[in-house]
Structure formats: C-alpha cells, structure tokens
Amino acid sequence: MRIDISQELPRRRGTSPSLRKPEVSRQETHPIARRMKALEERPRENRLNHAPPRRAQSQSVPREREVRTRKAKDLRDATDEQRTQRNPIPSQTIGMHFRPEERTVMLELGRFRVIRTNDLADTIYEGEVRKLDEDLRRLRSKGLIEIRHINLRRNGTRRHIALLQVATLTRDGRAWLGESGEIPKGQTVYDGFVKPREIEHDSLIYRAYRDAAARIENDGGSNLRVKLDFEIKADMQKDLHRAQKTDPKRDTAEIRRGVAEKHDLPFINEKIQIPDARIEFERKVDDSQSPERDQGSRVGGHEDIEVLTATYRRGHLRSKVQAGFRVYAFGADRSSITAKIEDDHDMMREILDL
C-alpha cells in the first residue's frame, strides 16, 4: 500500500496559510537601511538636489564686502558709545542725602585710591572714631566703598602680626562721585584695590600729602590737585611712544631726557624718576605792573612727594632723595632705611617723619 506524505511544514492550530506574515530580512529592518532606502525613493525634484542659482561674482563680492563693512562700523560705534557712556548712579543711592563728612570721605578715597581709616578719623572727623565707623558702615551698606584689613610688615619690634584697616571706592562709588559734582576740575579719581603688596605703602601717601598740603596752603597756595604716579606714568608713556614713532632713529636716552624735561621730572642714572604723587596748586603773586594791583596774578606750581619704606634698595633710596622730592618715611622704617644709607648722613636729614 502506498502512502503520500505532504512536504509542508506543520503550522500552529488556529492559523491559516493566508494570514502568515511575510518573512523580512534583518538587513531591511535596520534603521540605517530604511533611511538609505527612503533617500533613494525621494524624487529628483527635491530642493536639496538642486543648487541655488549663482549670481555674477562682480555683483556678489562688493555686496558682501559692503555688508561686512557696515557690520564692523556698527560694532565700533556701539563699542565707542559704551566706552564714553557714563556709569549710571547706583539705584540704592537715588534720593539719598549724604552728610558733608561722608562726601569728603568719598572724595578723598577717590583722589588717593586707598587710605587708612585712622587717618580719615584724624583729618575729617577730628578724632571721633565712632562717628567715622557709623559713616563707613552706611557707605559700605550702599555699596559705595570697600573696607579691607591687611597685615602690616614685620619690622622686628612687634611680636604679633598687626592688622591695618584701609578703605577704597567701589565702581558704584566712583560713578556716584562723578555725578555728584564733588570732583574738582581736572582731578582724576580711582576705585578698587590694586597691587596688594603695595597697599601698606600706598596708604601712607595720603598722610604725606596732608603734611605737604598744609605747608603749601600756609604759603598762599590754593586749588590743590593730586596726580598719583598712575596718571603721571600714563602721560609720560604717551609722550615716549609719540616721540619714538615720530623719529624711530632717535636715541632712546635722548627721548627719555626730553620727556622728563617736558613733565618737569628729574632724569638720574639714565632713568626718569617718578614720585608717588604730585601736588599741583596755584599761588597768588603780586604784580606791580598790573593795573589791578589789589588782585595780583596767580601762577601755577607743583610739589612732588615720595614715601620711603624699608623695602627700598639702597640705590633706589639714593635716587629718590637726589631727585629733589619731598621725601617721607614711617617711623618704624627709619631704622632700616638708616642702616642702608648710614654713610650718607646728609640724605637722612632730607627724610621727613610721617
């Protein structure tokens, strides 16, 4: 007996041959394969398959150059406007009234950048430290000043490290001062601490100035203006650069000597000696030839001051004294300075005590 066996594979119960899912290869189901197939099926009229029409180079290049030039000009104008625009008055100070002592404190801080608070108490508050502390707290709370404590240098006489309290203006304080009308004409003001290692030295400039200013005012000087070494150096560097650019072949020493003479600064050992501060003032002089003899005439003058510390080298000390500056030294530093120039007794007589 013959039996025919079917070659079809067995199927699950409840399924029919017509509902079987077509077999799909793994390659066709891969995401990259599907993406490639979709790209191939896109019509040729797709906008990505057509390059934009080209314009004549003679028209496009000048146009692009004009656009770049206009953008660069707009950027320069915006930058110049930002530089020349004044900082606005701090919002927390609008409508506030400051007492004369507070205004004077801010003006002095702006003129000298950094001052010891005990010197402010002596010169502005007549020694009333409590009143000064109240005003400093108020100005500090408004963000107009900054107060810092620094360590004094060791000089061998103190067992412990002494702290010094100093103050300076903030940017907001400088902006308010510029709008207040308190700044004398031609006076530069500063803000913020710079060169932390020199804060102790720079804080003594105000004390030296007060001594020199009192003598100038007793001699008839008025309208005092202060120029710190920052401003003097900036003016001097401008003239040096201008002279070197005008005549590059000119000797550098000769250029420096000419700039020193222009700014009335001493030129010693082929170097321009710059003081810590210059006090400019006006002085009334009797003029017998003037028809208005009662009024007389006023002439300008200046005096340079320098503060010496124990960190100065011997050659530096000698140059500063020889420059003819009005030289000051703190009492704690005199012993160290004397040891460096002990063979020059005449130099020690020129150094004044702070």
Image: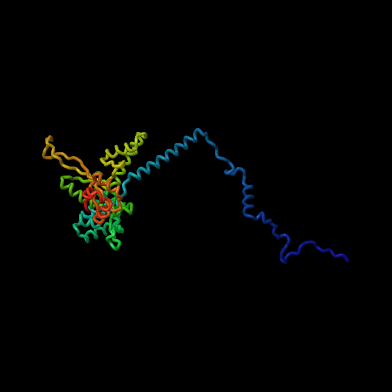
Task: Look at the picture and state if 241 lies above or below 24.
Answer: above
Task: Look at the picture and state if 196 lies above or below 65.
Answer: below
Residue that lies at the very extreme toward the top in this rendered image: 58
Image-based side of 48 in relation to 180, left or right: right
Residue 5 lies, in percent from the top left, at 82, 64
Q: Quadrant of the N terminus?
A: bottom right
Residue 202 seen in this snapshot: no
Residue 112 lies, in percent from the top left, at 26, 50
Residue 113 lies, in percent from the top left, at 28, 51
User: What kind of colouring is applied to the model shown?
Assistant: rainbow
Please name whichever residue, 291 or 163, is drawn nearer the observer in this view of the structure.
163
What residue is rendered at 29% in x and 46% in y? 229
What residue is rendered at 31% in x and 49% in y? 87
The tally of labels here is 0
Task: Look at the picture and state if 329 lies above or below 76.
Answer: below
Task: Look at the picture and state if 26 lies above or below 232.
Answer: below
Residue 67 lies, in percent from the top left, at 45, 38
Please name whichever residue, 272 or 51, is drawn nearer the observer in this view of the structure.
272
What residue is rendered at 36% in x and 36% in y? 245
Residue that lies at the very extreme toward the right in this rendered image: 1
Image-based side of 180 in relation to 62, left or right: left
Give residue 151's quadrant in the image: bottom left
Residue 128 seen in this snapshot: yes
Please name whichever residue, 88 or 187, is drawn nearer the observer in this view of the structure.
187
Please name whichever residue, 111 or 68, is drawn nearer the observer in this view of the structure.
111
Residue that lies at the very extreme toward the front in this rendered image: 343
